[in-house]
Image (tube, rainbow, N blue to C red):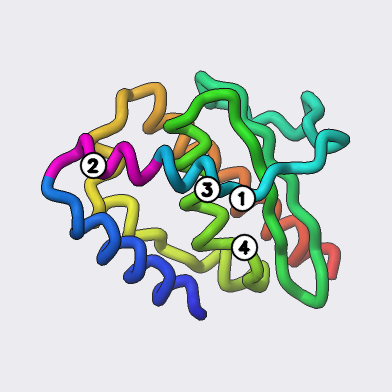
Amino acid sequence: MSIEETEQEIVEEFELFDDWMGRYEHLIDLGKSLPLIDEKNKTNDKLIKGCQAQVWLHSDFKNGKIIYTADSDAIITKGMVALMIRVLTNHTPDEIINSKLDFVEKIGLIKHLSPTRSNGLVSMIKQMKLDAIAYKVKS
């Protein structure tokens, strides 16, 4: 499934909820289903800078595609990183670098997050794209 198709799937999921309480609950559920990062990768160098909560992000490069894993100590933030992983994992560096990630605006996530959480989301996206650039340069 392409990044754009996954984004559209997420937009449709969030449209099922009438209010933001339901959307937050869905985000929390997504965080609960996030495959956990290996404990050996929960190190300071894997922490995303700019997040109020602690968010560890690890990436591997396999068969030309990037696989992300993550964890967070905050439930909403864990849901946000779960969304980003769902969209970007198992794609090529070029696909990730060129992704627009319009779904974030379409589901209203940015405007319904506190400023610190919005900054954290931007930091997550930036780190995932930086990882993609690094893998592209190496390959």
Task: Read off the magenta span.
Answer: 19-27
Q: Is residue 58 left or right of residue 12?
A: right
Mark 3–mark 1 Cα distance, whole angstroms, equals 12 Å
Callout 3: SS: helix
Residue depicted at 56% across the width and 54% down the height: 85
Farthest residue to the left: give it: 18
Task: Identify the amino acid type marked 1.
Answer: Met
Which comes sooner in the sequence, label 1 or label 4? Answer: 4
Residue named by callout 1: 128
Density class for disc 2 (Cα within 10 Å; few <14, some 14-19, many ≥20) is: few
Q: Is residue 33 left or right of residue 47?
A: left
Tell me the quarter of the image containing the C terminus.
bottom right
Callout 2: SS: helix
Residue named by callout 4: 89
Which comes sooner in the sequence, label 4 or label 2? Answer: 2
Task: Identify the amino acid type marked 4.
Answer: Thr
Residue named by callout 2: 22
- Position of residue 36 measured from the top left corner of the image (x, y, whole percent): 69, 43
Mark 4–mark 3 Cα distance, whole angstroms, equals 10 Å
Residue named by callout 3: 82
- Position of residue 108 measured from the top left corner of the image (x, y, whole percent): 23, 46
Of the two numbered discs 4 and 3 in the rendering, the one whose residue sits closer to the viewer: 3
Q: Is residue 26 above or below residue 132?
A: above
Callout 4: SS: loop
Of the two numbered discs 3 and 1 in the rendering, the one whose residue sits closer to the viewer: 3
Callout 1: SS: helix
Residue depicted at 23% across the width and 42% down the height: 22
Whether the residues at callouts 3 and 1 have beta carbons within 8 Å, the answer is no
Mark 1–mark 4 Cα distance, whole angstroms, equals 9 Å
Which comes sooner in the sequence, label 2 or label 3? Answer: 2
